[in-house]
Image (cartoon, rainbow, N blue to C red):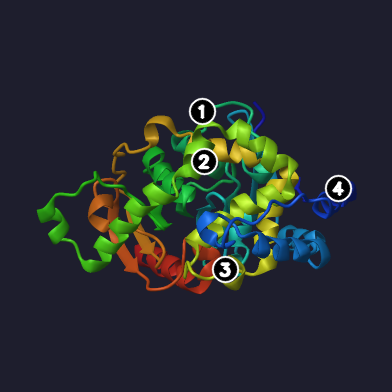
Amino acid sequence: MSEEITEFRIDIPQKRLDDLRTRLDATIWPAALPGDGWDTGVPVSWLREMVDYWRTEYSWRDAEAKLNAYPQFTTTIDGQRIYFMHVRSQNENATPLLLTHGWPGSVAEFLTVIPLLTDQFHLVIPALPGFGFSGPTNDSGWDTTRIAWAWATLMDRLGYEKFGVQGGDIGAAVSPEVARVAPDRVIGVHLNGPMAIPQFPIPEDEWASLTALEQDRLNRIQAFHGEEFGYIAIQSTRPQTLAYGLVDSPVGQLAWIMDKFREWTHPREADPDKIIDRDWLLTNVMIYWLTGTAGSAGYVGYAQDASWGAVAQNSGVPTAMIVFAHDAGVRRYLEPEHTIVRWTDVDRGGHFAAVEEPELLVADIREFFAGLK
């Protein structure tokens, strides 16, 4: 099998963008449900404003230029095309760092942090198999372990014997798995939004031993399972059925992703475009829309079979975890799987740390890896 690495540049045909405009202009809008609030999903009034901005002010060509400002490549690993950014530091002795995004994010999550990290790190930023320009998938079985082996192979092809890993959301599951499959190569694991789900109900004596912050996080985990788990149930069991609507309707794709950005940004009460720039939100959605990867991204992200709920082996690799205000990691439930040497609680920021709080995230990454040296 070829191990060739090929230069890549994003260049979406204009007819594809013209088709998008036609579809947006012809949107058939549903009637607003009573109250038209976020408790029943994305409000029609809010989404109409977003779509109007998408139609009249947003520029994909500007976004394309921002992405193309960084070196991009593709290579085939385990039969799957993998797209990645590779941004080398001017410091030849910089630490190689592999950054992994999650769902419903993309490599665009890291656009803000790239210039903040390249003095200390050589950055490798792949798109998960089935996501964006790494999609769609050619076969099944892309669980976190298989992705981890692919990432280790990618770093080998790039000539990086030793490297660090960082990630959030799905990236927070893939990154420690890279350390498990290649513990002699990974020097450190840095995670934002780490999650371990304990067995509920929690015994009374154990609950009493938790801090108020930890109890709040566990209450929010339980609320998530009762109020928000539907998207996981759909994407992990019927991703193909869902894909018809999301790949055919740009507004459907926008709504599906914006529902999560509203729930997972901080503070939750604020509309997502009050926290994250509208142009970035639309660029992230465009990556899914233009590549038609809603189905394969959902399938890869949540069809993890036995990986869900299983206690993974501790790699022994030093691990740092930063938990922002939205997220719900509790250290004692994460310690069996990780060698935690640094834990940081932050009273602001949400699930999309690289976009919401890039300076805080970068400072934690820099301090952790500098300490390892």
Where is residue 225 drawn, in percent x and y? 38, 47
Q: CA distance from mark 3 to mark 4?
A: 28 Å
- The residue identified by callout 3 is 271
Q: How many numbered circles does the render carry?
A: 4
Q: From the viewer's side, name the closer residue of 264 and 109.
A: 264
Marker disc for residue 301: 2
Residue at mark 1: 141
Circles 2 and 3: CB atoms closer than 8 Å: no
Label annotation for residue 19 = 4
Q: Quadrant of residue 50?
A: bottom right
Mark 3 and mark 4 lie on one chain; the one further toward the N terminus is 4
Residue type, mark 4 in image: Asp
Q: Position of residue 1 (x, y in %)?
A: 64, 26
Q: Secondary structure at mark 1?
A: loop
* Quarter in which the C terminus is drawn: bottom left
Q: CA distance from mark 3 to mark 1?
A: 36 Å
Circle nearer the N terminus (3, 1): 1
Residue nearest the viewer, comparing 187 with 299: 299
Mark 3 belongs to which amino acid? Answer: Asp
Q: Secondary structure at mark 2?
A: helix
Q: Nearer the viewer, residue 352 or 133?
A: 352
Name which quarter of the figure residue 54 lies in. Answer: bottom right
Residue 321 location (% of width, % of height): 36, 60
Q: Residue at x 24, y 61 (%)?
A: 215
Mark 3 vs mark 4: in front: 3
